[in-house]
Image (cartoon, coloured by chain):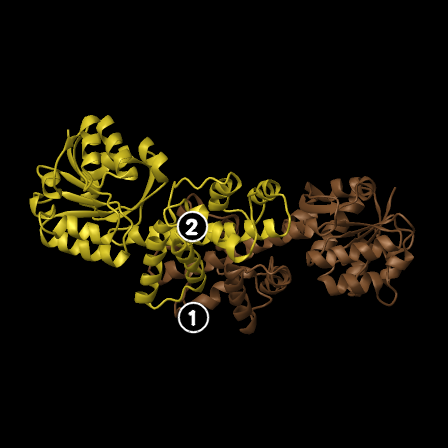
Chain colours: A brown, B yellow
Amino acid sequence: MTTIGFIGLGAMGMGMARVLLKEGFCVRGYDVMPAAVDRLTEAGGVGVSSAAEAAEGADLLILMVLNAEQVESVLFGEEGAAAKLSAGSVVMVCSTVPPAFARQTADRLYAQGLEMIDAPVSGGTGRAADGTLSMMTSGHPAAFERAEPVLSALAANVYRLGDECGQGSTMKMINQLLAGVHIVSAAEAMAFAAKSGMDLRTVYDIICTSAGGSWMFQNRVPHILEDDYTPHSAVDIWIKDLGIVLETGKAERFPLPLTAAAYQIYVAASALGWGRLDDAGIVKVYEMMGNVKIHGE
Amino acid sequence: MTTIGFIGLGAMGMGMARVLLKEGFCVRGYDVMPAAVDRLTEAGGVGVSSAAEAAEGADLLILMVLNAEQVESVLFGEEGAAAKLSAGSVVMVCSTVPPAFARQTADRLYAQGLEMIDAPVSGGTGRAADGTLSMMTSGHPAAFERAEPVLSALAANVYRLGDECGQGSTMKMINQLLAGVHIVSAAEAMAFAAKSGMDLRTVYDIICTSAGGSWMFQNRVPHILEDDYTPHSAVDIWIKDLGIVLETGKAERFPLPLTAAAYQIYVAASALGWGRLDDAGIVKVYEMMGNVKIHGE
């Protein structure tokens, strides 16, 4: 039985950690929220009280924290986890981070005799809890050999993008560029359809089988139709993820005019206090800008 | 046997006219290009030399011309077709036109005792030739009663949006907004992936099964991968169709920032002389702006 350290027990991380427990792994879990650590203990895991403790005796350390800053702090900060790992252990970074950060982090870990898998995920909390995520991965073959049973437990699809950390994160970034733009196009189109007096359910049904369709349109527009913005994925996630896309574009000197336009809609939604709503809630920006109400008073 | 007048025998119209001939309709066809009229005659139709002649004795008149200006001219211009139709005949406008234009055209036809079906199509030349188009339609029930056998011959899906002309065109406009934006997001994402050194076929395969996927991404990116911009649907079509979206947004006072950003990429492609290339050719704008080559010299 492999011992896994798991840091970041939020909606995604807790689902993944539970899958690993069910598959018979020993999971040492840490989160800044003590209640999350308690829930892991209740589920049969070993709840610990620091990142360093989670890493103790772990063959593999999974990070499912919010962003690059937290990855940095958890690995290399005070009471950091990296120093506690034994040589050859694998750090699997599942957070969405800039590709350049993934590369730099890998280099720092290699210098300490550790391995890394750059492994951002896609699929949301439901698929995290089912062990059917998609993972966009890269790293040394030796790291994959050790991590294989864990990847199989967590994901239905493990895409191998190459031997260099950063390639997995680049793939995720390209996916987020498209997904983030398509949520905005869905909102722009549906609010415009409402302004034009169309029946929105009919529009939805037709678009789902037409050339205008997208995965995001199909998945998110029902939230608009039901006026339900319970956050499955929040507006502010896109401030972060499209922020990574635009920052990387700036660093690589690659212009991204459509992504930049989409980003502004998320910024507006967040400015208006809707950052923690479901991302389909950006349609409220269009309702406001376009002076149209999709649902009655 | 119903007699059908058919005006506009381009790539779409010729396919549709041939389907109608195969189904046993008498088709009186006209196009400004005499060669197209000759091809219709060869296929068993009755080639004529003006719009007015096409309308003579027709129970139903189909317009598959380029734009609203041509619809206007063909129906109401010198030697216009509307004056030749007998009371109760149906004009089926299949061109993509502004919803407001469709409404106004219907009102003019109603005033002459004629009926109209607002019936823009989706599906491209392949499905036009197979009689498996999607048609987004609206108009009076009486018009649909007369047109039913013709709609069944031409389309696999006939969406009825309501009794008012303009509703079909609004539905098409919403579809074009999404489709037009998604071609640009596909180009932006693939060119950025190329700049980031990714293998583009792998990116394509992963996105097609991920949250970033769209109908347009799946359909158009292979043109980019194969470096083949034979025009199935040209860049300049989007100058027109997104132009309709933006003009309608202006008229209705509804802001469309994402569509506006996408539109500029088509304008750039057209400015650079690529207006008649396949619409996936807008990726060349990104290659140029981002200083990246997707294919070798």
- For the residue pair B194 and A165, the one nearer the viewer reads as B194
For disc 1, the chain is A
Percent across and percent down for residue B18 are: 25, 30
On screen, residue A94 above or below A263: above
Label drawn at residue B6: none
Mark 1 sits on what residue? Answer: A289
Q: Is residue B193 left or right of residue B19?
A: right
Q: Is residue B195 left or right of residue B266?
A: right
Q: CA distance from mark 1 to mark 2?
A: 23 Å
Instruction: Inspect this view and state whether residue A18 appears.
Output: yes
- For the residue pair B18 and A235, the one nearer the viewer reads as B18
For disc 2, the chain is B
Instruction: Inspect this view and state whether residue A234 appears.
Output: no
Q: Is residue A33 left or right of residue B158?
A: right
Mark 2 sits on what residue? Answer: B179
Residue found at the very far front of the displayed protein: B297
Closer to viewer: mark 1 or mark 2 = 2
* Residue kind at label 1, given as amino acid type: Met
* Residue kind at label 2, given as amino acid type: Ala
Percent across and percent down for residue B58 are: 12, 37
Specify the quadrant of the image occupied by residue A163: top right
Secondary structure of the residue carrying tag 1 is helix
